[in-house]
Amino acid sequence: MKINTAEFIISNSDVAKCPKDFMPEYAFIGRSNVGKSSLINMLTNQKKLAKTSGRPGKTQLINHFLINNNWFLVDLPGYGYAKVSKKTKSIFQEFITDYFETREQLVCAFVLIDIRHEAQTIDIEFMSYMGESEIPFCIVFTKADKISKVKIDSHVAAYKKKMFANNWAEMPHYFVTSATESTGKEELLSYIDEVNQEVFKNNNQF
């Protein structure tokens, strides 16, 4: 799939105010400073669609971007931001919980994980929440250009091991990406395109 148009639609903290259009939505979420904005800009071929910042936790709202006039890319606040309370850190902002558990248009979430680091408990816990809540998601490992292929394989294997230890039957579908080198761009967009085709074919509400 080629992204021809990407348009900012709305930012808000109230799920009830999200777009009413019944178009498939793909939500992007991860720990603060995981490279989410850079990844979104790389995928959409735009340098400033999502705001990048050296300050972790820049995204504080639900941001909807209309892609190719037929699906939404949703940029969500990060979890685990250092300046929020422990209660908030335990999962993440309440309106994000509302979004995941009530948004009918959501067809898949992409959980972003910095591949440079070994398996982090906060990421495992967040994915466990997604699994227990039966929210479909894929893992997107970011910043693959920062470490060697050997370390990438080692860190992915570590995540698999931890997830199996947490009673996962199998590793969720995952992508290895680099916003700097556009690694994984084609694979990720092809996946979204395939899911969209199935959604439009099988669900009359879209």
Image: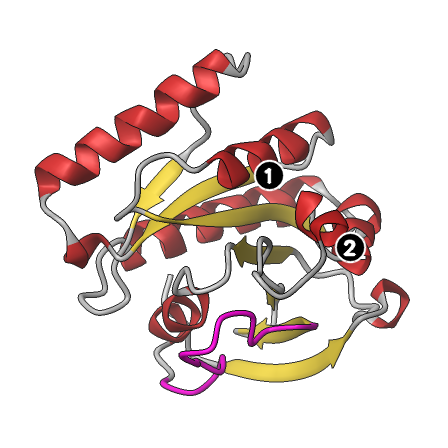
Q: Identify the residue under disc 1.
A: 126
- Residue type at mark 1 is Phe
Q: Tell me which secondary structure the magenta stretch mostly adopts.
A: loop
Dot 2, crowdedness within 10 Å: few (<14), some or many (≥20)? some
Q: Earlier in the sequence, mark 1 or mark 2?
A: 2
The quadrant of the picture occupied by the C terminus is bottom right
Residue 120 occupies quadrant: top left
Between residue 10 and residue 3, name the one nearer to us.
10
Q: Is residue 144 magenta?
A: no
Q: Give how far apart the Cα atoms at labels 1 and 2 are.
A: 15 Å
Does 152 sit left or right of 17 as displayed? left
Q: Identify the residue under disc 2.
A: 99
Q: Residue at x 19, y 32 (%)?
A: 153
Q: Is residue 54 magenta?
A: yes
- Residue type at mark 2 is Tyr
- Residue 130: x, y in percent? 65, 35
